[in-house]
Amino acid sequence: MSNGRIISMDMGGKAEDEAMKARRKSIEVWMLTTFQGQKMVLLLNVPPSVARRPERFWQPITGGVRAGETAEEACLREIKEETGVEVQLNELTKWPHSFELELADTHLSKTLFLAELDHPPPRVQINPEKHDAYQWVAIEQCPEWLFWPSNHATWAEVVTKLSEEQDKSHGTRLVSRQLPYRVSLAEITDTCVCNEFRY
């Protein structure tokens, strides 16, 4: 086992089964920006056809690390592939530890990143092969949209970091407000549904 934090366990496996599991590396990126004084986070919707589940769900930017890639390179590539947004390396914050997930047949080592953008990016261009909608959510409302326990765990880490940074800068407490726009699951069709800012 690595020095990372275990945030999800498949409790049904035996020790010998654990040793035979495939090991994969992945990245997870929480993209944040500020709109009208409110910190917002980008969430992408995974449809049932991609998730191979009966229900759709929302998640941050995720993806695997290819052979020969660093986690940073994979992060920048996945951001571009899944959102069309180009982010610079100096806009990324990387967590010093990995997050270890024990799945049914895979041991997943996840590297967590935070991408804080100074200005709202231009229109997000999602990859229709992976997602069918996106939305910018006020950070206080983010947990109610998340499905996977691992996403809840990593988001909690992001919130802790943001709170620590705010304490250091003596900033005012973030106040939740209603979204400029909000996409409900009932509004999602087979076409790409987007949640843009109102300028």
Image: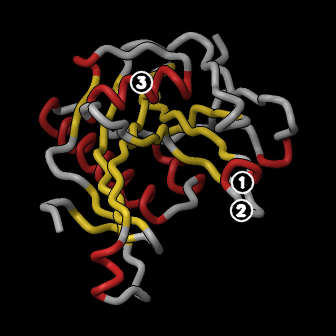
> Which label belongs to residue 17?
none
* Residue 154: x %, y % from top left: 35, 53
Q: Dot 2 corresponds to which residue?
A: 53
Instruction: Give the colour scheme of this rendering.
Output: secondary structure
Q: Residue at x 60, y 19 (%)?
A: 124
> Which label belongs to residue 56?
1
Judge from the rendering whether residue 1 lies leftward or rightward of residue 136; answer left or right: left
Residue situated in front as seen by the camera: 168 or 88: 88
Residue situated in front as seen by the camera: 32 or 167: 32
Residue type (three-letter) at the residue carrying disc 2: Arg
Q: Residue at x 55, y 55 (%)?
A: 146
Counting residues from the N terminus, which is met first, the one under dot 2 or under dot 3?
2
* Residue 38: x %, y % from top left: 46, 29
Q: Dot 3 corresponds to which residue?
A: 77
Q: Secondary structure at mark 1?
A: loop
The residue carrying pointer 2 sits among few (fewer than 14), some (14 to 19) or many (20 or more) residues within 10 Å by Cα, namely: few
Residue type (three-letter) at the residue carrying disc 3: Arg
Q: Residue at x 33, y 49 (%)?
A: 25
- Disc nearest the viewer among 3 and 1: 3
Counting residues from the N terminus, which is met first, the one under dot 3 or under dot 1?
1
Q: Secondary structure at mark 2?
A: loop
Residue type (three-letter) at the residue carrying disc 1: Arg
Residue situated in front as seen by the camera: 135 or 8: 8
Q: Residue at x 69, y 34 (%)?
A: 129
Above or below, 109 relative to 40? below
The residue carrying pointer 3 sits among few (fewer than 14), some (14 to 19) or many (20 or more) residues within 10 Å by Cα, namely: some
Above or below, 67 relative to 58? above
Q: Secondary structure at mark 3?
A: helix
